[in-house]
Amino acid sequence: MTRDRVAQADGTRRVGAMKNWRYIGLHALGAAAFIFLLQRYALSASLESSLLWALTFGGCAAGLAYSQANR
């Protein structure tokens, strides 16, 4: 509901869209960092494997955050 009020006050939806992209980016970055640290240090995986898993989970987290932000 607050997104609608911001859009009405501004006349555009740029402010709401910017908050969504920031939320999506932070969600993806947090998930990627978490899975990288888990794989690399807790499970003693190789650097390449850890980076691949971080990229995969970051992409999945970004997709999930995007779908939630556009509901």
Image: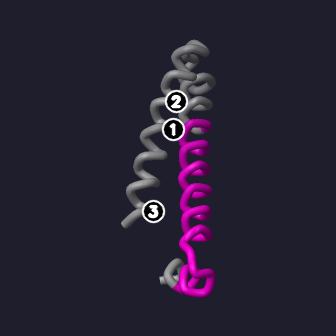
Residue positioned most to the front: 11
Residue closest to the eye, 39 or 11: 11
Give the number of the mark in front: 2 or 3. Answer: 3
- Give SS at disc 2: helix
Q: Work out whether mark 3 precedes mark 1 in sequence or the reverse, and give the earlier one.
A: 1
Give the class, few, some or many, for how many residues have Cα within 10 Å of label 3's Cα (few <14, many ≥20). some
Q: Quadrant of residue 50?
A: top right
Residue at 58% in and 81% down = 11
Q: Is 12 placed above or below 23 here?
A: below
Chief SS of the magenta region: helix
Label 2 to label 1, Cα distance in Å? 5 Å
- Give SS at disc 1: helix
Q: Is residue 51 left or right of residue 65?
A: right
Residue at 46% in and 30% down = 56
Residue closest to the eye, 42 or 13: 13
Label 3 to label 1, Cα distance in Å? 16 Å
Give me the disc on residue 55: 2
CB of mark 2 within 8 Å of CB of mark 1?
A: yes
Give me the disc on residue 29: none
The amino acid pointed to by label 3 is: Ala
**Region rendered in magenta:** 5-33
Badge count: 3
Q: Is residue 11 left or right of residue 62?
A: right
Give the class, few, some or many, for how many residues have Cα within 10 Å of label 2's Cα (few <14, many ≥20). some
Q: Is 3 placed above or below 58 here?
A: below
Give residue 34's position: percent from left, percent from top. 58, 38
Q: Which residue is mark 1?
A: 58
Q: Is 30 placed above or below 70 here?
A: above
